[in-house]
Amino acid sequence: MNTEGRKDIKAGFIGLGAMGTHMARNVAKGHYLTSVWNRTEAGAITLSQELGVQCAVSPALVASHADVILICVSADADVLEVIHAMLPALRPQSIVVDMSTVSSDTAREAARLVESKGADFLDAPVTGGVEGAKNGTLAIMVGGRLEPLERAMPVLETMGSRIVHMGDVGAGQAAKAVNQIMAAGINEAVTEALAFGSALGLDMRKVIDVVSGGAAGNWFLEKRGPTMTQGLFKPGFKLALHQKDLKICKGMADKLGIELSVTEMAMTDYAKLIAEGHGDEDISALYRLKRP
Ligand code: NA7
């Protein structure tokens, strides 16, 4: 794959939330970013000034200038809304890269719309958390044609350190569903184990340190263990967004006739937390239900 930098590419970024803000900064560091748009204008104004790029007044304005249009918004309907809004201005040869986590069906619908204008679509959800977004070390799972992926690659490389082509449109989102099921199980296991250790009266800093060095060590334990055991659940990855992903996973599993018992447990727990008003907290807020 040709990954040589092509500084003539103009990129636009749509959706400057917890992830998108950091991702856009990295695209700007690579000298590709020319414009940003966010639904709530204030965030876009501040970031555009910081990065010295255009603060677009609409998704269509981003689409009219950019060769690579990056999207990172919340859910399925939001992605389609943004794509409908940019469609009249979308130019042939442009590449729309959706980095939100949505269903494979939504990715295929988005591709149909984008391709009707002669442009290309890639679904490219990410994993690696806000930390990965900040450091430019996200893992990016891509669905779509290889040729536009190769053209967009220099831009994607500013945000991710592992970029894998999974197959046709929708395959990136399918891989992300695998990731989200695993993340739910890890969250259930880590919060339960740390609450148990706390109830035993152990020094949890030492527990996290020693367990992280062995077979049960994992990213979530290292990054979120120290904060959750102190009752800190600042996002992070919002619990309500993970619940949205797990609903997508459950829908896919139902079609396949597969049971997702751990995922269903997490969905029940998340529903309780969301009802109690914790949906905007990090997913490690699951510790609230487990702690002594
Ligand atoms: P955040 O921090 O909740 O940010 C969500 C962003 O999406 C934010 O910029 C929102 O704009 C934007 N958004 C949401 N709905 C819309 C619609 N309908 N139109 C335009 N823009 C919209 O989420 P994260 O950054 O953590 O995650 C983003 C995605 O990556 C998500 O799919 C995760 O599951 C993975 P706002 O500022 O609220 O106006």
Image: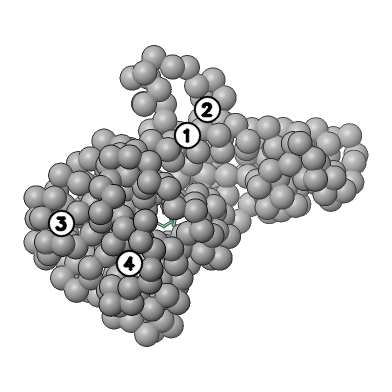
Q: Residues within 10 Å of mark 2 (few under 14, many from 20)?
A: many
**Which residue bears the numbered disc 4?**
13
Q: Earlier in the sequence, mark 2 or mark 3?
A: 3
Q: For the residue labelled by badge 2, is the local secondary structure a helix, a strand or a loop?
A: helix
- Label 3 to label 4: alpha-carbon separation: 17 Å
Q: Earlier in the sequence, mark 2 or mark 1?
A: 1
Please report the residue visible at 15 percent of the width from the left and 70 percent of the height from the top. 64
From the viewer's side, name the closer residue of 83 and 287: 83
Q: For the residue labelled by badge 3, is the local secondary structure a helix, a strand or a loop?
A: loop
- Label 1 to label 3: alpha-carbon separation: 28 Å
**Which residue bears the numbered disc 3?**
119
State which quadrant residue 52 falls in: bottom left
Q: Residues within 10 Å of mark 3 (few under 14, many from 20)?
A: many
Q: Which tag is nearer the camera, tag 1 or tag 4?
A: 1
Q: Earlier in the sequence, mark 1 or mark 3?
A: 3
Estimate the x, y position of residue 184 in percent, counting from the top left: 56, 35
Q: How many marks?
A: 4
Q: Which tag is nearer the camera, tag 2 or tag 1?
A: 1
From the viewer's side, name the closer residue of 198 and 245: 245
- Label 2 to label 4: alpha-carbon separation: 32 Å
Please report the residue visible at 31 percent of the width from the left and 61 percent of the height from the top. 152
Instruction: State yes or no: discs 2 and 3 in contact (Cβ < 8 Å).
Output: no
**Which residue bears the numbered disc 2?**
263
